[in-house]
Amino acid sequence: YLADMSGIRSIDVSVPASASELDHLYTTGNATGVDVAGDAAYVADGGNGLVVVDVTVSVTATLRGVTPSRALRTVTVAL
């Protein structure tokens, strides 16, 4: 998964020489960081806050929820 300012992209890197995009989920903030734990991606989305995305199926990521924040830039998940 890759944060790219407009959201997150699911990238298939099973063959590194021919990586390909599987999905792009747009967010309303500026996505600057992403961490994945289990079937959820946690996105640092700037002024939008923490965005939680269901990545159970990587080709159809869906929004689970948003926790507002003033200027979230990085995210690390510890379970």
Image (tube, helix red, strand yellow):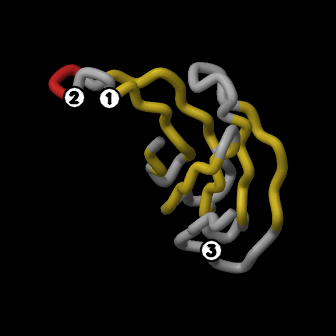
Q: Which residue is mark 3?
A: 72
Question: What x and y, as percent, mark residue 51?
Answer: 72, 55
Amino acid at dot 2: Pro
As drawn, 61 above or below 42: above
Q: Where residue 31 sits: x, y (%)?
A: 55, 57
C-alpha distance separating marks 3 and 1: 27 Å
Tag 3's secondary structure? loop
Q: Are marks 2 and 1 in contact (CB under 8 Å)?
A: yes
Amino acid type for the residue under numbered disc 1? Val
Give the mark nearer the N terminus: 3 vs 1.
Answer: 1
Q: Is residue 68 left or right of residue 60?
A: right
Mark 2 to mark 1 CA distance (whole Å) = 5 Å
Task: Indicate left or right for 64 with 19 as reference.
Answer: right
Residue at 41 percent of width and 31 percent of height? 11
Mark 3 or 1: the one toward you: 1
How many C-alpha atoms fall within 10 Å of the one at disc 3: few (<14), some, or many (≥20)?
A: many
**x%, y% of residue 32?**
49, 62
Under circle 1, the secondary element is loop
- Give the residue displayed 62% in from the left and 56% down from the top: 43
- Residue position for label 1: 13
